[in-house]
Amino acid sequence: MSAYKTILVHADASRHAPARIELAARLAMAHEAHLTGAAMNGLPRFLYEGTELQVALQLAGEQMAVLERQAHDALDAFDAQCARLGVAAYERRQLNDDPEGGLILQARYADLLVVSQPDPDETRFTTLGDLPAYVTLNCARPVLVVPYAAAGMAYPPRAALVAWDGSPPATRAITAALPMLRRAGHVTLAIFNPGQRWGLHGEEPGADMALYLARHGVQVDVHTRDGVEDEGNALLSLAADRGAGLLVMGAYGHSRFRKLVLGGVTATVLSSMTIPVLLAH
């Protein structure tokens, strides 16, 4: 990807929304991109197709008004924050949908989707509690996940860590992250247990991808390590050691009837991350 032209950010009532929106805004300003804030009322859009629900909605008019007001207020806060930060081009979209369905739909028209890591203390703000995993596995765009435990994240990052295993998801993640990686001070390409993936890395693991990144103007070095059993925690530890402000990785898993089955590395990173993580499936 050469540049971000449209960035989509989830706007909601969470206390972590300002940090999420601020990072999305700084990305938009740095890349001269259009920023869209999307807020949902929480009801899946397919429910609106049933006649039975129309009666229920009339009976529950007051509750519906509350949900609509919450979404409206979240977008008012989004507008105010964008104006305060000086975002040149932004818009708001209020949708009759749940957060998962609404974001997946709107992400089709964006280059990057920005969401927050779920906070266990705020499960009431999502119906699933695993919003980043669900949208990553079900939308066709890269997803930047902002940790709930961090605030005031700098962009561009001083350093970035890229997890490389030769797979299609990792390839998509790297391609999607190129605009950010070019702006990072330095990038480390991490390859764990390269011998276990015979035929994917060539004679010198990481050399081909490092060359690809260098040709895109990325300052990169290669870090390989064998004998790693817990790759998720190893990635997070290496990111801390390198002072990385961004982790880029492929996401593994599948979703069936909204039941998520995540790969172990993806699940570990999403549960324990303390820096922004860009995921692609």
Image: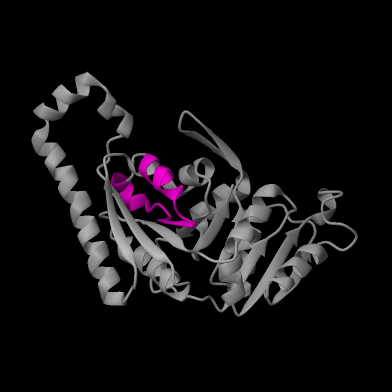
Residue sitting nearer the eye, 275 or 206: 206
On the image, the x and y values in percent for residue 175 come to: 63, 59
Q: Is residue 204 above or below residue 32?
A: above
Tag count in the figure? 0
Residue 9 among magenta residues: no
On the image, the x and y values in percent for residue 27 come to: 45, 70
Residue sitting nearer the eye, 195 or 183: 183
Q: Is residue 129 at all visible to an observer of this figure? A: no
Q: Is residue 19 above or below residue 84?
A: above
253 sits left or right of 107 in the view? right
Which residue is drawn at the image coordinates 46% and 47% (left, top)?
Answer: 108
On the image, the x and y values in percent for residue 110 come to: 45, 54
Which residue is drawn at the image coordinates 49% and 52% (left, top)?
Answer: 271
On the image, the x and y values in percent for residue 152 come to: 39, 74
53 sits left or right of 164 in the view? left
Q: How is the image coloured?
A: one colour
Q: Residue furthest right?
A: 203
Which residue is drawn at the image coordinates 56% and 54% (left, top)?
Answer: 279
**What span is colored magenta in the figure?**
101-125
Q: Is residue 168 at all visible to an observer of this figure? A: yes
Residue 189 falls in which quadrant of the image?
A: bottom right
57 sits left or right of 241 in the view? left
Residue 148 falls in which quadrant of the image?
A: bottom left
Residue 116 among magenta residues: yes
